[in-house]
Image: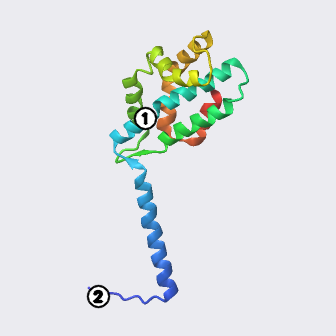
Amino acid sequence: MAKKVVRLTGNELHRLVKTVTKRVLNEELLMEMAYPRNEFVRMVYDKLQQIIQNWCLVRYSTLTGDNPNKSHWKTELLTHIVSVASNKIKKNNSYQNRFKATKEVWEKKECDRDVNVVGMLALPQFIEEGIDYKDVICKQVFYDCMNASSSLIQIIAAADEEAIKQYIESI
């Protein structure tokens, strides 16, 4: 087999090296955001309390009327959900696999079936914000959060930032 020799000018060589370097770096950066499944589960687990707390604060402000912190809590919730949802699972980043991995965390912490767990996760932030957590409205918020577990799991699994924003607006 005869080898073909290609002669490149300095500019052509520079463009070729630059193009190859960009492609290699882009592939490496894309792979950096892909984690083994157990690591993805750990990241969801690590953010669960902040997601629950901010979800409850947003819901509380919706049920009680205008709250000067509602916008801040929405931004916090968006940040926490996106930080988890933007990660990928190596080898199988399908919606079904992401849903199953996220659901494992909710089930392990019993956030999907025990309102007391939801309340205990949200409690520190409610105390810090000076909200009377014994109020009937707070109990309703904790029930609402528990009942919204499926929606939260779906929105994380879908990993669509626009859908996440729309979901937060609907709380």
Q: Secondary structure at mark 1?
A: helix
User: Does residue 42 appear left or right of residue 13 in this picture?
Assistant: left
User: Eyeballing the image, is 99 above or below 30?
Assistant: above
> Label 1 amino acid?
Asp
Q: Residue at x 37, y 29 (%)?
A: 104
* Residue bearing mark 1: 46
User: Eyeballing the image, is 135 above or below 32?
Assistant: above
Estimate how packed mark 2 is, as few (under 14), some (14 to 19) or many (20 or more) residues with alpha carbons within 10 Å.
Answer: few
What is the quadrant of residue 92 in the picture? top left
Q: Position of residue 107 (x, y in %)?
A: 39, 24
The answer for how far apart the CA atoms under marks 2 and 1 are is 58 Å
Q: Which mark is residue 5?
A: none
What is the quadrant of residue 164 in the picture? top right
Query: Which quarter shows the N terminus?
Result: bottom left
Query: Which quarter shows the C terminus?
Result: top right
Between 105 and 64, the residue placed more toward the observer is 64
User: Eyeballing the image, is 47 above or below 127?
Assistant: below
Q: Position of residue 148 (x, y in %)?
A: 53, 23
User: Does residue 102 appear left or right of residue 80 in this picture?
Assistant: left
- Which callout, 2 or 1, points at the residue further toward the start of the chain? 2
Between 1 and 146, the residue placed more toward the observer is 146
Q: Residue at x 42, y 26 (%)?
A: 106
* Residue bearing mark 2: 2
Estimate how packed mark 1 is, as few (under 14), some (14 to 19) or many (20 or more) residues with alpha carbons within 10 Å.
Answer: few
> Label 2 amino acid?
Ala
Q: Residue at x 58, y 17 (%)?
A: 141
What is the quadrant of residue 72 in the picture? top right
Report the coloring of the rendering: rainbow
Q: Position of residue 13 (x, y in %)?
A: 46, 83
Q: Position of residue 68 (x, y in %)?
A: 72, 29
Q: Secondary structure at mark 2?
A: loop
Query: Of circles 2 and 1, which is in front?
Result: 1
